[in-house]
Amino acid sequence: GESVGLHLPTLSVQEGDNSIINCAYSNSASDYFIWYKQESGKGPQFIIDIRSNMDKRQGQRVTVLLNKTVKHLSLQIAATQPGDSAVYFCADGYSSASKIIFGSGTRLSIRP
Amino acid sequence: GAVVSQHPSWVICKSGTSVKIECRSLDFQATTMFWYRQFPKQSLMLMATSNEGSKATYEQGVEKDKFLINHASLTLSTLTVTSAHPEDSSFYICSASSPVGLAGAVDTQYFGPGTRLTVL
């Protein structure tokens, strides 16, 4: 079946350092991926997305990399700040069907 | 833009009662809305997809007679948990997909803030 998984359940990063959160997917036909940030007690917040015809996309302080060969994507957060503390989910979005399958999540904690 | 609200934000009810949760798209029309359930320290699990004016499509393992979904308008979907039991206690989150014209991909989902349900 379809699955999107994360390599690490928790990640601790020094404030100011860069964070890298990894994600693997199993469906080679997947063509759309999204990263979400979820703070405690809140709904997911869209961070950035990428389609399979791209291998890199940049936003404000965030970069998503997609490696279709090994079915892996990553979220890079530059200069991590305390406000970045949250659980990050990668999600597999089926184009036009709008159905999203969430991965298990990685909790990012920031050390002062 | 693309704001989704949920009401109530939290609710406590007695076992055996029914609870209705509303999901509204405040500044756009959502042809499709989704309902998710999230248990503590777990990921979001899609429960059902609802399209305005038609019956919801439920994911495998989700009881459609227990989780009633109504999508009566392009801005409102409701989830009713019938005969709630303590194991239904969870964080329920809705999302709405944006139509063409809004910023972001056409199939971007915008999520509500969630509703915490506690069944005693």
Image: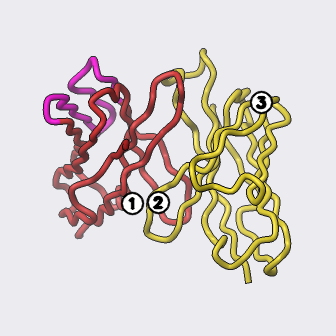
The chain assigned the colour red in the figure is A
Measure the C-alpha gap from mark 1 to mark 3.
33 Å
Residue at the spot of label 1: A86
Q: Nearer the viewer, residue A63 or B60?
A: B60
Quadrant in which the N terminus of chain B appears: top right
Marks 1 and 2 in Cβ contact (< 8 Å): yes
Question: Which mark is in front, 1 or 3?
Answer: 3
Residue A58 location (% of width, % of height)? 28, 29
- For the point 21% across and 24% down, which residue is it? A55
Q: Residue at x 45, y 29 (%)?
A: A94
Q: Amino acid at mark 1?
A: Ala
Q: Are marks 2 and 3 on the same chain?
A: no
Above-or-below relation of B103 to A67: above
Chain letter for mark 3, please: B
Element under label 3? loop
Q: Earlier in the sequence, mark 1 or mark 2?
A: 2
Residue B29 pos. (x, y %): 73, 27
Q: Is residue B63 left or right of residue A67?
A: right
Q: Does the stretch in magenta take in A57?
A: yes
Q: In the image, residue A33 lies at what x, y percent?
A: 36, 34
- Identify residue type, mark 2: Glu
Name the foreground residue: B100 vs B13. B13
**Is disc 1 in the same subunit as disc 3?**
no
Q: Which circle marks residue B52 in the picture?
A: 3
Which mark is drawn over residue A39? 2
Task: Tell whether A21 sits left or right of B14.
Answer: left
Answer above or below: position of A100 versus B63: above
Q: What range is drawn magenta here?
A: A50-70
The residue located at (67%, 61%) in the rendering is B115
Query: Color of chain B here?
Result: yellow
